[in-house]
Image: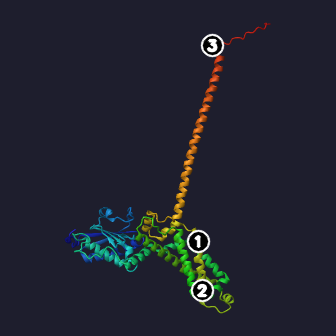
């Protein structure tokens, strides 16, 4: 399209926004109308932005290859441009990519986690405007003389820290509450026991807030470590990812699970505080403490009870489904990527045990085949001997029947002659 076409009011130009489920899709829906207005004011003409629900598959390398699907998408939807918003942390030589055009003039891939957690929608909208504006020029998308696109690669510690926070945001740690039902049940039950048990109140009031804080941290860390190990969330060196991707993945996993457990712990703390006020009468608590009580006594009681609940949550996690926890920990596309590289498998001990089990099964299979061969040979020998015996018996029967039949061939049975006188 030339510049004269863009200035004609009767011509519509269409930008297609495709996005992965979750945060990218919400961002695409939120910026669609504003992006159309920005394009009209910047480039002139009449623009519309369409949001499509289609999700592109992952390639063998775990990346989304937009350039392979761009011609089909443009033709099927009658789009002039296509922008794909993804939550995958796309990298090039270890550096996260803000966007990827791959030499195409009408297609671009935008990595949402690189924007971090602050003003993500406005940043994505500005970048999308620059990408489309660059694509309207004949020299192609990303030409140095015709656009002011930011660098594709995001180098430096600050950009990697922004990427890490963006990955945690895209994982949506609050969803873990729905998957960790066993943890919530065990934590709530144990915490409620602490409320009803009288000696817990005396101990809680006697503890210093710093000691309670230390117990809280220990309880949360214990639950986080147990959830990661029990559900196979830690990425191992042999999973096919690069070293930088593996480190970033593990860091995002720790922060995601830690944030989810922290939110769960705060909710448990509030619930235990309400339960303590509702159950523990002030007069009864005064008799336990032998002094007047205040609201801080209830806070200490709820605090210690929540700590007990955090430790008990590790036990309750054994009743939660591993697949549900994994899906709730990561975004949909990152979950698919981890399954592609077998990142969910357990540690080396389990793999060695699995190999040992396969070896035993192979040996048993070979033994069974040997026994089957011996049994077949034995059965064949028995069948041969039985057939020979049957043939011998048949020959004997034939001989006997042959002798008997000779007397009847001459005209019937002959009488046996003897020397006895006839009467």
In the image, residue 377 lies at what x, y percent? 57, 38
Considering depth in this image, is 419 or 381 the residue closer to the camera?
Answer: 381
Q: Residue at x 60, y 86 (%)?
A: 300
Q: Earlier in the sequence, mark 3 or mark 1?
A: 1
Q: Are marks 3 and 1 in contact (CB under 8 Å)?
A: no
Indicate the quadrant containing the N terminus: top left, top right, bottom left or bottom right.
bottom left
Q: Is residue 270 visible?
A: no
Relative image position of residue 166 (x, y in whole percent): 41, 76
Tell how many labels.
3
Disc 3: which residue:
409
- Disc 2: CA contacts within 10 A as few (<14), some (14-19) or many (>=20): many
Q: Is there a contact, CB below 8 Å, between mark 3 and mark 2? A: no
Please tell me which residue is depicted at 50% across the width and 74% down the height of the picture: 257
Q: Quadrant of residue 226?
A: bottom right
Let me know if residue 357 appears in the view. Answer: yes
Residue sitting at x 66%, y 88%: 285
| Label 1 Cα crowd, 10 Å radius (few <14 / some 14-19 / many 20+) | some
> Image quadrant of residue 394?
top right
Query: What percent of the width, then of the height, locates residue 351?
Result: 51, 62
Colour treatment of the image: rainbow
Q: Residue at image x 53%, y 71%?
A: 227
Q: Which label is found at residue 316?
A: 1
Of the residues under marks 2 and 1, which one precedes in the sequence? 2
Give the Cα distance between marks 2 and 1: 24 Å
**Helix, strand or loop for disc 2:** helix
With respect to residue 290, does 223 lie above or below? above
Q: CA distance from mark 3 to mark 1?
A: 96 Å
Residue 247 vs residue 285, the one in the foreground: 247
Q: On the image, which quarter does residue 37 sit in?
A: bottom left
Structural crowding at the residue carrying mark 3, measured as other residues with C-alpha within 10 Å and reported as few (<14), some (14–19) or many (≥20): few
Provide the residue designation for mark 2: 300
């Amino acid at each position: 399209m030339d510049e004269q076409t863009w200035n004609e009011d009767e011509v519509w130009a269409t930008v297609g926004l495709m996005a992965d489920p979750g945060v990218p899709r919400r961002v695409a829906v939120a910026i669609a109308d504003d992006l159309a207005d920005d394009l009209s004011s910047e480039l002139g003409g009449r623009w519309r932005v369409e949001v499509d629900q289609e999700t592109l598959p992952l390639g063998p390398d775990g990346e989304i290859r937009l350039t392979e699907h761009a011609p089909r998408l443009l033709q099927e939807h009658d789009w002039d441009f296509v922008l794909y918003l993804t939550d995958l942390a796309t990298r090039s030589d270890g550096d996260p990519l803000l966007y990827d055009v791959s030499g195409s003039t009408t297609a671009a891939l935008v990595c949402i986690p690189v924007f971090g957690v602050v003003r993500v929608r406005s940043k994505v909208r500005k970048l999308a405007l620059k990408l489309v504006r660059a694509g309207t020029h004949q020299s192609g998308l990303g030409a140095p003389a015709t656009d002011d696109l930011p660098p594709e690669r995001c180098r430096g510690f600050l950009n990697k820290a922004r990427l890490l926070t963006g990955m945690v945001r895209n994982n949506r740690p609050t969803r873990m509450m729905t998957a960790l039902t066993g943890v919530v049940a065990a934590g709530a039950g144990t915490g409620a026991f602490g409320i009803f048990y009288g000696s817990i109140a005396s101990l809680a009031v006697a503890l210093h807030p710093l000691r309670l804080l230390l117990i809280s941290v220990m309880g949360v860390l214990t639950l986080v470590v147990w959830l990661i190990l029990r559900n196979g969330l830690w990425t191992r060196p042999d999973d096919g990812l690069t070293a930088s991707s593996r480190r970033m993945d593990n860091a995002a996993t720790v922060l995601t699970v830690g944030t989810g457990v922290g939110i769960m712990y705060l909710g448990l703390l509030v619930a235990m505080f309400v339960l303590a006020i509702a159950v523990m009468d002030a007069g009864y608590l005064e008799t336990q403490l032998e002094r007047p009580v205040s609201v801080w006594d209830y806070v200490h009681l709820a605090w210690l009870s929540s700590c007990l609940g955090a430790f008990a949550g590790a036990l309750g996690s054994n009743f939660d489904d591993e697949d549900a926890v994994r899906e709730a920990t990561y975004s949909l596309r990152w979950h698919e990527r981890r399954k592609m590289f077998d990142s969910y498998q357990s540690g080396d001990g389990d793999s060695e045990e699995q190999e040992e089990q396969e070896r035993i099964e192979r040996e048993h299979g070979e033994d069974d085949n040997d026994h089957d061969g011996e049994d077949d040979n034995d059965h064949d020998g028995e069948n041969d001997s039985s057939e020979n015996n049957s043939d011998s018996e048949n020959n004997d029967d034939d001989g006997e029947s042959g002798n008997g039949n000779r007397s009847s061939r001459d005209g019937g049975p002959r009488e046996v002659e003897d020397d006895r006188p006839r009467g």
